[in-house]
Amino acid sequence: MLITRRLEFDAGHRIPDHRSQCRHLHGHRYVIEITLSGKVIDKAGDAANGMVMDFSQVKQLAREHLVDAWDHAFLAYSGDSAIVEFLASLPGHKTALLDRVPTAENLARIAFDRLNAVHRDTYGNHLQLERVRIYETPNCWADAVRAGTD
């Protein structure tokens, strides 16, 4: 069984080597979809009876390990020294430094790696992260999937 939880967040970024508009500072209303697989829990009296995982737990883990850090932050590539220096000069600015250029593809890979580490088979139902989809716009997205997150 597959389940998916969708969350939204706002963040800024830039793609330093891009040859068009995305090289400029700008922002997006990102959407992240987290898809998990597992067996439906069949334990009478268990709060998760009939579920793969409670959707509220999927949301809580996503917020705690990813979304809260990226929401209303500037997602900056640590190798983009001019921007990193500029953002550091802004008192109290929320910046998320990344080891990769913040394209949709790289954000999906980073998100998959972070969330994969926190989704455990806690119910004995073979729970695992299958896919993280990041929408940069309503028409453009990237998927990092278990079979090949590269």
Image (tube, rainbow, N blue to C red):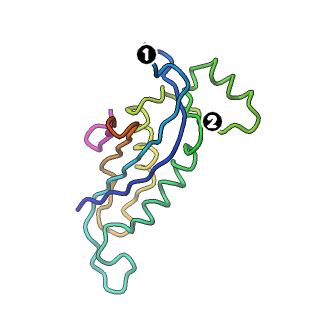
Q: Is residue 149 magenta?
A: yes
Q: Position of residue 139 (x, y in %)?
A: 32, 37
Mark 1, residues whose alpha carbon is within 10 Å: few (<14), some, or many (≥20)? few
The percent coordinates of residue 62 (x first, y second) are 47, 54
Residue type at mark 1 is Ser
Q: Nearer the viewer, mark 1 or mark 2?
A: 1
- What residue is shown at x 71% (from left), y 28% (from top)? 88
- The magenta segment is 142-150
Q: Residue furthest right?
A: 91
Taking the magenta stretch, the answer to whether it contains residue 145 is yes
The picture places residue 94, in percent across and down from the top left corner, at 65, 39
Could you say whether the residue bearing mark 2 is in a helix, strand or loop?
A: strand
User: Residue 71 appears in which quarter of the rendering?
Assistant: top right
- Relative side of 58 to 90, left or right: left
Callout 2 amino acid: Thr
Q: Secondary structure at mark 1?
A: loop
Determine which residue is flagged by label 1.
20
Q: What residue do we see at 35% from left, 40% from top?
A: 138
Query: Where is mark 2, residue-wise?
Result: 95
Position above or below: 111 against 39: above
Residue most extreme to the top: 19
Q: CA distance from mark 1 to mark 2?
A: 23 Å
